[in-house]
Image (cartoon, rainbow, N blue to C red):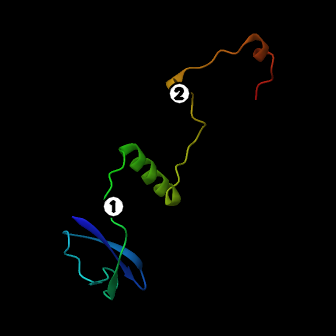
Amino acid sequence: MTTYSFRCEEHGTVDVRRGFGLAPAVAPCPVCGLPMRRVWTAPMVSLAPRAAVEAIDRAERSRTEPEVVSRVPGRPGGRTVAPTPAQRRLPRP
């Protein structure tokens, strides 16, 4: 299956999945039924590493669904560092 992009004048860009080479030049908008013209985009022919794809997807999601945390994350591995004698004399927050 291939993803084709169409643009509706009222509702913006809509992605439609069709078999390779089976997308028409004009398709009806799924919301209002008006004809949408096909938008030509660059093909996604390269395979990116999974970690890179996940990072890009996470960045895209954060635009509309920001990740919210309730506290500062701990140290990696869950280890705590013991303060030195000099650090023990410092005021605590």
In the drawing, what numbered circle is on residue 88?
none
The residue under label 1 is 44
Q: How crowded is mark 1: few (under 14 residues within 10 Å), some or many (20 or more)?
A: few
Query: Where residue 70 appears, x then y in whole percent?
Result: 58, 42
Relative depth, front residue between 53 and 65: 53
Determine the residue located farthest toward the bottom in the rendered image. 34
Q: Compute the Cα span from label 1 to label 2.
A: 35 Å
Q: Reply above or below: 36 against 73.
A: below
* Of pointers 1 and 2, the one earlier in the residue sequence: 1
Relative depth, front residue between 26 and 28: 26
Query: In the rendered structure, which amino acid carries the disc numbered 2?
Result: Pro
Query: In the rendered structure, which amino acid carries the disc numbered 1?
Result: Met
Quadrant where the N terminus is found in the figure: bottom left
Determine the residue located farthest toward the top in the rendered image. 85
In the drawing, what numbered circle is on residue 76?
2
> What residue is rendered at 50% in x and 60% in y?
64
